[in-house]
Amino acid sequence: MNKPNNSKFTQGSPNPQGQKNYSVDESVKKSFKEFDLKSLYSSQAEKVAKVIHQESSGKFNKNSQIRKFYDELYNLKMKVELSKDVEAEFSKVLPIVYLLGSKSAYARGRDKIGDNFFNFLKSNVMKIESFEDLKTFLLYFEAVLGYYKFLNPKE
């Protein structure tokens, strides 16, 4: 029996509205756990920002759309930090962190974000296992945002 191929969520999917697709760059699929902090926050963040910017073409990956995902993660981090029991609170927010994977799929389906940003977000949020991971990824995401804003200043 043939199983359906559900790889469209990791490969650069044909878009439901029939718009042009961009190929998915392998650098956006790499997890934050694969790099030392120095290269993660500098060269890797810059590389990912450039890849995301190249597919933007003014149509998707708007600063506000990318910032929306960052802000949601940041708010979850603050909720954990301000709680009395960090571990217990983190275990409550972790499913919401993972939910960002499906929220990014929804945004991709509506042409709000491109394949590369979708893969960057999904690949990384699914690797978060601890509060330290969340903080590390959030700093990485912030570095990507900084480079992206540099490349896309007028938006």
Image (cartoon, rainbow, N blue to C red):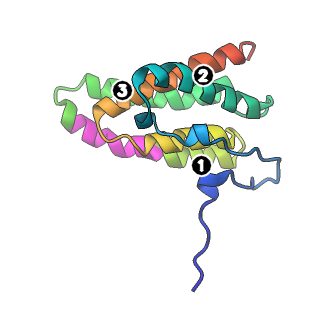
Label 1 and label 2: CA atoms lie apart by 23 Å
Q: In the depicted view, which residue is nearer to us: 136 or 86? A: 136
In this rendering, position of residue 57 left or right of residue 28 = right
Element type at marker 1?
helix
Judge depth for marks 1 and 2 and give the one in front.
2
**Magenta segment boundaries in residue numbering:** 88-99
Q: Which residue is mark 2?
A: 46
In this rendering, the label closer to the viewer, 3 or 2: 2
Identify residue for label 3: 135
| Residue 39: image location, x then y, percent | 48, 22
Q: Secondary structure at mark 2?
A: helix
Give amino acid for label 1. Answer: Ala
Q: Which residue is mark 1?
A: 105
Q: Earlier in the sequence, mark 3 or mark 2?
A: 2
Is 130 above or below relative to 75? below
Tag 3 secondary structure? helix
Does residue 55 appear left or right of residue 98 in this picture?
Answer: right
115 displayed left or right of 91: right
